[in-house]
Amino acid sequence: MSKRILIVDDEDGIRYSLRGILEDEGFHIFEAESGEKALQILAEDQPDLVFLDIWLPGMDGLEVLDRIKKEWDWMPVVMISGHGNIETAVSAIKKGAFDFIEKPLSLEKVVITAEKAVEFSRLQSENKALKTRIETEQPARITGKSSTVETMREVIGQVAPTDAWVLITGENGTGKEIVARSIHSLSLRADKPLVAVNCAAIPEELIESELFGHEKGAFTGAEKAQEGKFELADTGTLFLDEIGDMSLKTQAKILRILQEQRFERVGGRKTINVDVRVIAATNKDLYQEIKEGNFREDLYYRLKVFPLEVPPLRERSEDIPLLIDEFISRLNRKHGFKPLTFTEASMKVLTSYSWPGNVRELKNFVERMLIMFGGKEVGPDKLPPEIVDGPRAETREQEQLPLPLPEGEVDFKKARADFEAQFLETKLREYKGNVAKLAEAVGLERSSLYRKLKAYEIQVD
């Protein structure tokens, strides 16, 4: 974090002395000889700390303190005076001053006070960031023992310690947010903020202010300056969720800032430099969005340093019992529900259901069952009709397959791969080579389907 101090004093000698002391300690110094000049500097370039003399020509120090606390309430201010007394010190502290030191200034106290005040400023900034972090009771880990999940854990373990940007894709409700949290928690930035932005939830006219911050008066309702998400995520991770829902205009601005890692607040002139790792996520096929003119190709490739696809729940049905147990345990702790169990027959139904809403749908289902049947055992007769009568993941994948069952010893992975290859080739012929229709029919992301077809060397017309 930068260490910048504004010194406000009408005595040249005091400013010169303080500058020398503090620059030797690595601080960057601004100077003002009056309260009016100080406010002008603050409006253009906000430091991390202000040393403010009480006795100034024109506007006095206490009046300047009032203005600072009104406009920039987060900024620590250390009052200095050669005419200090208990009443003045108490008055300054009540008005929000961080500390009060008397002239002649003790060099040691000046340095110690400056360090403490800057640390206080840093903690305040981190506190703001904490309020914008992803609020969820979900842990930063992916539940499951399927080969798909194990592979994804390995990939996360490889990319997390690097500073590479990650583009997470997957259907709604698959847990892209948890993957982002997992990457951050295993990164070298784990002790820094993880700041989330839901690009789909912010109105178009406010997204620039939300991302880059704004100065007072930048637009109607901007009564004071405010930091944006990029500033709050400085030295940490910025999670851009639903990145595919941003307008082309905002995409252009995001691209420039991602490339340069610097920007100006809305209505501001000061350039702010940041060090941010970006993790983006979307449920859209961005390649198709590019073809349709809805997403910038250059932004796509800037974000796609390391692509990571989160599989739908129907592709890892063996994880469903583990997820159910986890949701029951978590919801019991949070809401005090009575324990709930599912019979073997019920679990067979649940693991064969396709779960179009993925993990999010499963969690909602478990909460519903706890409300209705807490303390009981749930058989198939108590399951909702849409679960019992809904599309079955197994039957949909196995229909019209001529693949015979091999006899004797068989390598399971090879058998599964042979099955999948013949399944995809058969269905592709059925849909006359239309990959888009096939992807929709079998419930795969188009990009994932293309990769599978390429891996199995299935010709696409």
Image (cartoon, rainbow, N blue to C red):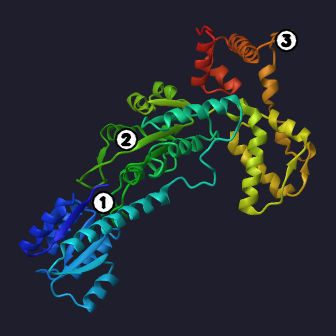
Which of the 4 quarters of the picture holds residue 349? top right
Query: Given the current orientation, which residue lies at the most extreme front position?
Result: 108
* Place of residue 339 in the rendered image (x, y in percent of width and height, measured from the top left): 83, 56
> Given the image, on which type of amino acid does mark 2 rest?
Ile
Which residue is depicted at the point 53% across and 37% down? 282
Q: Residues within 10 Å of mark 2 (few under 14, many from 20)?
A: some
What residue sits right under mark 1 in the picture?
215
| Amino acid type of the residue tagged 3 in the rendering | Leu
* Cα separation between marks 3 and 1: 69 Å
Q: What residue type is labelled 1?
A: Glu
Q: Which of marks 3 and 2 is nearer the N terminus?
A: 2
Q: Tell me the quarter of the image containing the C terminus.
A: top right
Name the foreground residue: 188 vs 340: 188
Residue 347 drawn at (x, y percent):
85, 39
Q: Horizontal placement of 87 versus 404: left or right?
A: left
**Residue where numbered disc 3 is placed:** 405
Frontmost of labels 3 and 1 is: 3
Residue designated by label 2: 254
